[in-house]
Image: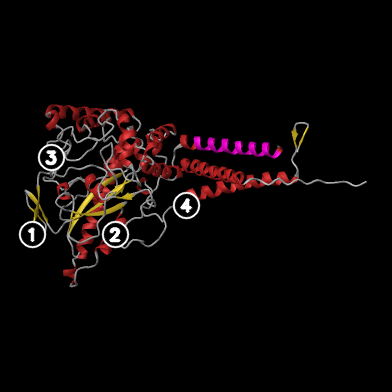
Amino acid sequence: MSENIVVRVKKRAWYVWLLWAVWIALLLFLAQNAIASARELESRASMIFWISFGVALIAGAVIWFVRRNE
Amino acid sequence: MADNGKVKLNRRDFLRIAGVGAGATAVAAVTKSAAAAPSYQMESFSDPAGRPHRPWWVRTVDEPTTEIDWSKVQRYNERMGSTRGPGMAKYVGEDEVERLSEVGAKLEKERILAGVDGYTLKDYALKDAHASYGRSYLGPQEAATPEERGVPKWEGPPEEAARIIRAAMRHFGAAQIAFIELDENTRKLIYAVDPDGKELIFTDEKEASETEDARYIPNDCKYAIVYTVQMSQETMRRCPTVLASQTTSLAYRRGEIIQASTQEFLRGLGYQCLGESSTNALGIAPALAVMAGLGEMSRLNRLVTPEFGPMVRVFKLLTDLPVATDKPIDAGIMEFCKRCKKCAEACPSESLSFLDEPTWETRGGWNNPGHKAYFEDSVTCRTYWREQAGTNCGICFAVCPFSKKDQAWVHEWVKAGAATAPFLDSFFRSMDDAFGYGTQPSSESWWSLDLPEYGVDSCRPVQEV
């Protein structure tokens, strides 16, 4: 009896790569502003940037998991 | 791979997630170190005249963004202002001035005894520590001249002259330095009468001089050196308190020191340098700064710079050393003011203009006609200072969206956006409020801050690579 293993490779479209790069850039932007706002002693701005960073991070992670499982 | 609704992680997925997490951590660490690293870089001037390399969204223009009718501009009698000469008494009467002084004195004692935040004894002591070392129109004249040394005076092309003056004045503590040549129009920005009542008279004589009644400006001293000194934004945001106001006093004292040093420096080169005889004397500082390209006029009717917002004090000198001159700028600041109005809304005495567009119409003798501006009511402003604040106010400076420390990247993006996409100005103003900028922290907390020298970041370069 022989076993057949099927390997399916799905290539990401170029725009998917671009969107992920935009997501990384957004995280970088939000993190920098959060940290620098704290150094500026602007606590409310820092909090808003950190929350935005967290939301963007979680959103990206969720989308990655969902797409991976499709 | 999902199995009965549960997501299972294999080794490859686990390593991918760990890699992303490590990458995010690395980004945060690099960002933190980048945010902590000083922005100052030791580089040679890239421009032969040492001109600063402004951000790409700052355009040099031939005409300032403030519309001027030079035919209507006159040399101003500074004794018409609300703070000098007869001052407030000219507008409200001696009795009212006396009453306001009594109110101020009573409030001062009550606040000290009550330990009011920002008005404690140590706040007043700090303010009084900024004693004036004295200003001089002709300068200290202590430095040895080239003639006394038996050597020829310094000579060089205007670009080099501008560059060495900039290098010296930056070392003395000036934030921005620019130059203009006084022509038949800009000469009108030199006062007709100084605050102490002495006339300022242009003369064909080669040497500047001063008598009991007048100060004589040689026509050769036609190059104005305009410079700014930073104020501490972290300190000023605690206004209107005595603690906050002393950053203004400190900036004036530093400007005084820079003036004396520059006068002596130019004397040592073999040239004259005429300065302010008292605070804000000699000429209209914001106007000269606008013409020299240090910034633009604004709704708070003071200079707002692209680099430091309104958090600067402006000073001027005159010299006969030929220098490379500068031109006005357009950084979208005056345009932003049309839609923002944050300073006018925050002003407790409603002294600032709420008009959408600047106007030619002045509001009193304290204003100099001949340019479109958001003219303020100086009397109600000063009345608030004396009757309620008990000191200089500064709220308009502190709430201005351009008053930022510029460590967060978003500030540069907003400034660039304001300069290039005015339709976003209202959105930027809304976000400035939403993010809590311009709010007033506790004055007592200032005494626990580990601020840099003078409370400013002197490593923020005007010159950006």
Q: Nearer the viewer, residue B289 or B128?
A: B289
Label placed on residue B79: 3
Spatial CA span between label 3 and label 4: 47 Å
What colour-coding does the image apply?
Answer: secondary structure
Q: Which residue is mark 1?
A: B205
> Of callouts 4 and 1, which one flags the residue occurring earlier in the amino acid sequence?
4
Q: Using the rendered view, name the quadrant where residue B383 is placed.
A: top left
- Quadrant including the N terminus of chain B: top right
Residue count near mark 3 (Cα–Cα under 10 Å), binned few <14, some 14–19, many ≥20: many
Q: Amino acid at mark 2?
A: Ala
Spatial CA span between label 2 and label 3: 33 Å
> Of callouts 2 and 3, which one flags the residue occurring earlier in the amino acid sequence?
3
> Of callouts 1 and 3, which one flags the residue occurring earlier in the amino acid sequence?
3
Dot 3: what SS?
Answer: helix
Q: Which residues are magenta?
A: A47-68
For residue B256, above or below residue B110: below
Q: Which residue is mark 2?
A: B168
Q: Which residue is mark 4?
A: B37
